[in-house]
Amino acid sequence: MVEEVLLKCAVVDDSSLQRLSIVKLIKDHPNLKLVAEYNNAIETKNGLLDVETDLIFLDIEMPILSGFELLDNLPNKPQIIFVTGKTKYAFKAFDYDAVDYIHKPVTKERFNNAVDKAVNLYKLKHQTAVPEDDDYIFVKSNLKNRKVFLSKLKYIQALGDYVKFVTEKDNFVVLATMKSFEKQLPSDRFLRTHKSYIVNLEKIERYNSKHVEIEKEKLPLSRHKKNNLVEALEAIQQEG
């Protein structure tokens, strides 16, 4: 199965009670993971240098630096959901490409609606990294996201800084790493049989100690990968 989206979150609010309420909502949400809490903008600015963050729940009115001033000072901005007691900043908030603007006190329903927007936006921006389901993945080719059905994918091959996709229909090359696709492809259906090859286990017709054969093509099999291949094929046979 392909992993669901999990956004790394930080909460920024000078009120400990408000932070606590947002933290609880984050911990109850399956698509969120809390990585940091901050009580002021300066602490946040320094903290974000060391903590990878996808989404910030950000208060606006804080001492020293406001939420807006914090964003003005961030070189790389995560997604932002403003959480504030004032409605007057709503228009300005969207000048900062905010995902949403939640008015305190925050209800669970309103919070979840805002998070849904953030998750959907993340998927749109990372479609090559987040397949919609385990039947196909999106691969960026010629500046477009191309759908590749896993049942039609025979193997992929490393070619320097590029990766070649070989499907039942055609072949194409993309600028990417093998490692990135090894993480995407379901491990019960695909196996890295060699440093330069990941193969569809269901397409293998025969193999020996040196090669796997897919439609009369002989692909190299690393010596230390043979046991993994045997185990994977046996598992497929048992499931069938």
Image (cartoon, helix red, strand yellow):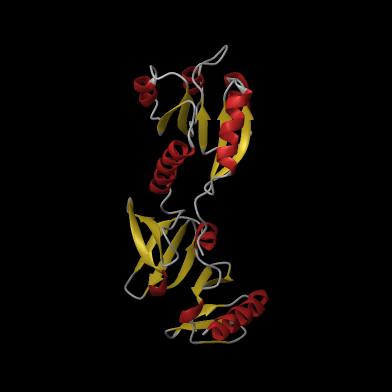
Depicted 106 relative to depicted 123: above or below: above
Residue at image point 33% right, 71% down: 170
Residue at image point 35% right, 76% down: 168
Depicted 209 relative to depicted 135: above or below: below
Residue at image point 52% right, 70% down: 197
Question: In the image, is 74 to the left or to the right of 143?
Answer: right
Question: In the image, is 193 to the left or to the right of 111?
Answer: right
Count of numbered circles in the view:
0
Q: Nearer the viewer, residue 6 or 226?
A: 6
Residue at image point 34% right, 21% down: 91
Report which quarter residue 117 is drawn in. Answer: top left
Q: Nearer the viewer, residue 35 or 224?
A: 35
Question: In the image, is 150 to the left or to the right of 170?
Answer: right
Q: Nearer the viewer, residue 138 or 163?
A: 138
Visible in this render: residue 52?
no
Visible in this render: residue 31?
yes
Q: Nearer the viewer, residue 141 or 238?
A: 238
Depicted 80 relative to depicted 172: above or below: above
Q: Position of residue 236 (x, y in %)?
A: 55, 81
Report the residue that reaches farthest toward the top.
64
Depicted 167 relative to depicted 140: above or below: below
Q: Position of residue 208 (x, y in %)?
A: 59, 87
Q: Position of residue 213 (x, y in %)?
A: 49, 84
Q: Position of residue 58 (x, y in %)?
A: 51, 27
